[in-house]
Image (cartoon, rainbow, N blue to C red):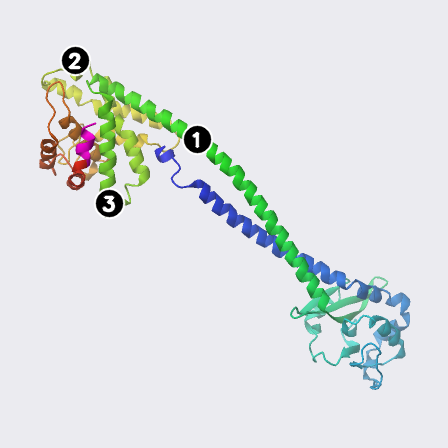
Amino acid sequence: MGSLRIKNNLLVQYSFISLCMTIIIAFLMSWVLVNQIKHQMIIGHSDFYQSYVRAIPENYSEIIPLLDNHTLLNKTPDSSEKDEHHDSFNVETPDIRWLHFKTDLLQYPTVKQFRIINRENEVIWQFKDQNIPENSSPFNTMIKNLEHKDISYHIQSENPYFLVYYYIPIIVEEENIGTVEILDLDPNLRKSIIKNRKLVILMIFIGGFLFYSSLFFLFSRVYYNQSKALDKLDKSQSLTIYTMSQLAELRDDNTGAHINRTSLYCKILGSELSKVDKYKNYLTKAYLDDLERSAPLHDIGKVGIPDSILQKPGKLSAEEFEIIKTHPQLGAKVLKNASESLDFQSFFEIGYQIVLYHHENWDGSGYPFGTIAEEIPLSARIMSISDVYDALTTSRPYKSAFSHEKAMKIIVDDSGKKFDPDLIDALLNISDQFREISKQ
């Protein structure tokens, strides 16, 4: 429907945009959920560590006083002491009271190191695998979190396995009196996290695909139904325009063939002109569609001209010609009123230009205003040549039809006078097409 017609494939645009949005949303959801699941699995993995630390006040109450005695670290450890589960450990044992806690905790082979930190953030006892590098602990960067009553952790490495430092507060009577740092190395944790990560991503993207497919199906149905409705409206509108135009033409003793021919002349002349760099950005497909649809309206103002003048077989008097010259303004008034009742841009705007200016001449000798050169709208300049060519090659009450060659000579001779020279150049390129249309 001209400017109302969908200029591009809206379904493709919608599909592309919705697909991009679905992918972006799926990616963000995956990122959030994967990290949340990863966090929950890491915290869940530490549940048994937390249970031991929470049990310190009850099951290992004898070591609580040691948290206030950080000088114990200066005692010389028994370097010969070995643990039956961790033979490679370097054990520093300041007090026998730590041994029960250590023995219970180290029953889990994934524990590679743990340290006891008092409320002054000083390490008062540690137990470390000899394969763990010195100063690998992120303790110094985690100090600010150690006053909290919740567990915190730091992932030291994720590849080839998860190496996680846990910081679990020792709470006595709702007071944080110290922290246990545990280094956990569990290959199975990484496998579980990766497995769940893949599952979450797969489920989200499957869900996203199903969601996108549903949207695409619904929108395509709506788009298809709307396209059918627009096509019906387009045909109805075209028929209405044709009927209105034919009423004016029939009063001028013309037939509907004149309307069809002038529309085709305008279309092919505009298409040829669009190949010129000067006009190609202006003469778009939408513009040419509107031009073709508007062309039949060019003489609609003749409905306001008396039959005695329109159908006079002889030459018009000067007074009668002045009355004829009012038909562009009469028709333009009708289209202007129609256009102003719409709240969107329509092809009536081009129709208005054609109706009002199609009798203007390039040199300013035309009517109704004597508009000159490029001040005349391009649509009207195209219509002017199309209308004159059809008038010359068809018979009228006052003349016989001219041949194609004679009509072309008359028009070309008026280049720069009545007609735009650029349009004459374009016309010469498609002269044969005009000849074929004139036979219709």
* Extreme-top residue of the structure: 308
Report the span colored magenta.
433-440
Disc 2 versus disc 1: nearer the observer: 1
What amino acid is at disc 2?
A: Ser
N-terminal of the pair, mark 2 or mark 1, is 1
Is label 3 in contact with label 1 (beta carbons under 8 Å)?
Answer: no
Q: Residue at x 30, y 23 (%)?
A: 242
What amino acid is at disc 1?
A: Lys
Whether residue 171 is visible to the viewer of this picture, yes or no, is no
Which numbered circle lies on residue 308? 2
The Cα–Cα distance between marks 2 and 1, rounded to whole angstroms, is 45 Å
Is label 2 in contact with label 1 (beta carbons under 8 Å)?
Answer: no
Q: Residues within 10 Å of mark 3 (few under 14, many from 20)?
A: few
Would you say 101 lies left or right of 359 here?
right
Q: Which element is circle 3 on?
A: loop
Above or below: residue 369 compared with residue 423: above
Q: Which element is circle 1 on?
A: helix
The Cα–Cα distance between marks 2 and 3, rounded to whole angstroms, is 44 Å
Disc 2 versus disc 3: nearer the observer: 3
Above or below: residue 331 compared with residue 6: above
Residue, disc 3: 275
Disc 3 versus disc 1: nearer the observer: 1
Q: Residues within 10 Å of mark 1 (few under 14, many from 20)?
A: few
User: Residue 304: which quarter of the image?
Assistant: top left
User: Residue 436: within the magenta?
Assistant: yes
Foreground residue among 342 and 438? 438
The Cα–Cα distance between marks 3 and 1, rounded to whole angstroms, is 32 Å
Q: Residue at x 18, y 34 (%)?
A: 434
Residue, disc 1: 228
User: Residue 391: within the magenta?
Assistant: no
Q: Residue at x 31, y 24 (%)?
A: 241
